[in-house]
Amino acid sequence: MKKHLLLALFSGALGLLMINCNPKTDQRTMTESVQVQPKGTITVTTFGKLPDGTSIPQYTLTNNQGMTMKVIGYGGIITSLTAPDKNGKLEDVVLGYDSLEGYVAKSPYFGAIVGRYGNRIGKGKFTLDGKTYTLAQNNNGNSLHGGPAGFDKRVWTIEAYPVDNGTAIKLTYLSKDMEEGFPGNLQAEVIYHLTDKNELKISYKATTDKKTIVNLTQHTYFNLSGNTKTDILQHELMLNADKFVPVDKTLIPTGELKDVSGTPFDFKTPTAIGARIDKDDAQLKAGGGYDHCWVLNGPDDSLKLAGTLHDPATGRVMSVHTTEPGVQFYSGNFLDGSITGKFNTIYNKRYGLCLETEHFPDSPNQKNFPSVVLNPGEVYQTQTVYTFSVK
Ligand code: BGC
């Protein structure tokens, strides 16, 4: 029941205090505010306790524009993120709950880090070096988002992370050999960096001691209306992709990479999400709307534009850049009004959308998709940047 103040660093005139909270031992309510930049701060409070008594901290990061991001140790969940509208009004642009109980009881991955494998693996099976691994089938006979107890339900250790611009935290989690059926002890690290340019830079890293597969992503549901006033059907989306990944009825890729031209999947120019979502189209029917991976134009492995999202009503714009080859655009089709979230809002169908940057679904079983294999000695490293502006 101890908070460890690990170290205090001084760089020039700027004081930087690193806090390491051990969730297993920390029973106290924590409230700590430290100045990490001239105007950026990190505050730590207790968000709640898991049924086993584990205390879950919430870190609030504030940049010098007043933008704030709140992150909890459970699932590395982004519980809140504010962004200015065209009048400079800061409002929350992500879905979630006010309390930990909500996230634990029922959450369609709100704000969470998803791993070891973002999206689906067909029949929950894959083969490495001739050995077949079987994962739990938690979605129509397939494995989804790392299984029933994926990274979104694990307790991550959080500490402040030193940066020159804005504020940042580092989250770490050791996924044990064969956890949820995946081989190898996987040491995962995620850095959330809120810059003073209103960017959220997310850097993922992982290493393993046995050959394995890995595909980490972030499952935040965005709604740029601010404090979730309406659904996302009027948001205009542009996706920098000439092709997408068609799926079967259980949302497993058919293996084809299909040209978006002439289909409701063509977002090469900004288009309202609601404009074609209910069209009579077999792929839209399979997903109940958009729930597909787009194949991003531009080089794999280097930062490139994935897309932009614009809410004409508030002027908020979010652009997404990533080193990943794909982005899963999920239009919140399975939200059904059964969840009441922050601001007492009932999350009806399509009240939020996800832009999950990642490798393509079912890559371990698709020989033509970019590889998701990680070998011992290699470092898995990807980056995604969400930038907020107005127009
Ligand atoms: C998937 C959806 C799924 C959702 C979970 C998305 O990433 O593509 O099919 O329902 O996550 O809420």
Image (cartoon, rainbow, N blue to C red):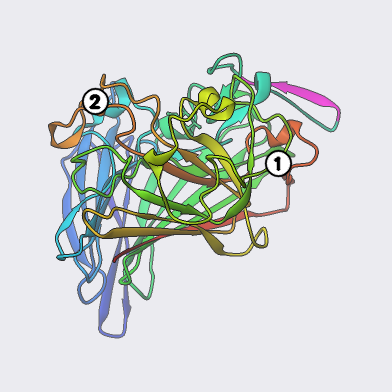
Q: Is residue 134 magenta?
A: yes
Tell me residue 161's x, y (percent): 38, 62
**Please, what secondary structure does the residue beneath circle 1 have?**
loop
Residue where numbered disc 2 is placed: 101
Snapshot quadrant of residue 83: bottom left
**Few, some or many residues within 10 Å of mark 1 (<14, 14–19, 20+):** some
Indicate if the residue with disc 2 has its beta carbon within 8 Å of ligand 1: no
Q: Amino acid at mark 1?
A: Leu
- Residue at x 31% of width, y 41% of height: 232
- Residue at x 20% of width, y 60% of height: 85
- Residue at x 51% of width, y 26% of height: 280
Residue 34's disc number: none
In this image, 138 relative to 164: left or right? right
**Please, what secondary structure does the residue beneath circle 2 have?**
helix
Residue where numbered disc 1 is placed: 257
Tell me residue 259's x, y (percent): 67, 45
For marks 2 and 1, the one nearer the N-term is 2
